[in-house]
Amino acid sequence: MKINDVLRGKGNQVVTISPEATVTELLTLLAERNIGAVVVSADGASVDGIVSERDIVRLWNGTPDAGQVRVSAIMTSEVHTCTPDDLIDNLMRLMTDRRIRHVPVVVDGNLAGLVSIGDVVKSRIGELEFETQQLSNYISS
């Protein structure tokens, strides 16, 4: 199964935030959208970074006026990305090895989607259920 199969099921809408936004604006966006990470993008198409709940927790722990800190100060700049043609198994390996939960999908340098660990698990469960059904049908016929 490929990343494109996951995007077909969940859609390719990605929430982005400007690197100049404040952490308070970031928190508001995360709460409004009920999401755990946001792609940081100055133009809404490129991937300048990614920021997650973990980044906010690290900042909040002892930083005075943390809400006024710019997103660019806490984002992860070295973002691991994938393409729609990458295999889910390879993405699972990347997420596990790098201990990351969100990976932007990029096509020709432009943001084309975002895949979370939950999306990967859901697709894997779907594959296993399909295989189980096929084996059950084979055995009963």
Image: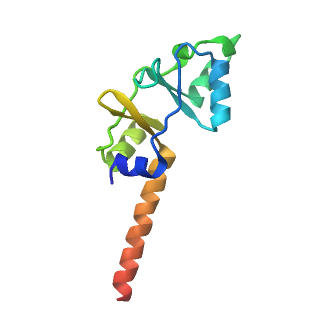
Residue visible at 44% across and 55% down in the picture: 123
**On the rendered image, what quadrant is the N terminus found in?**
bottom left
Q: Quadrant of the C terminus?
A: bottom left
**Which of the 4 image quarters holds residue 37?**
top right
Up/down of 95 relative to 65, above or below: below
Above-or-below relation of 88 to 22: below
User: For residue 55, what is the image quadrant?
Assistant: top right
Q: How is the image coloured?
A: rainbow
Q: Residue at x 62, y 15 (%)?
A: 22
Q: Position of residue 79 (x, y in %)?
A: 40, 26
Q: Which residue reaches farthest right?
A: 65
Side of 55 relative to 134 (left or right): right
Picture quadrant of residue 98: top left
Among all residues in the image, which is located at the extreme bottom? 141
Q: Is residue 60 visible?
A: no
User: Residue 139 location, x and y as percent?
Assistant: 36, 85
In this picture, is 137 found above or below 65? below
Q: Is residue 125 visible?
A: yes
Q: Residue 133: x, y in percent?
A: 41, 75
Give the residue displayed 51% in from the left and 47% down from the top. 118
Q: Is residue 60 left or right of residue 133?
A: right
Identify the residue at image location x=55%, y=12%: 20
Q: How many marks?
A: 0
Residue 46, horizontal then vertical, whole percent = 40, 23
Give left or right: position of 26 versus 114: right
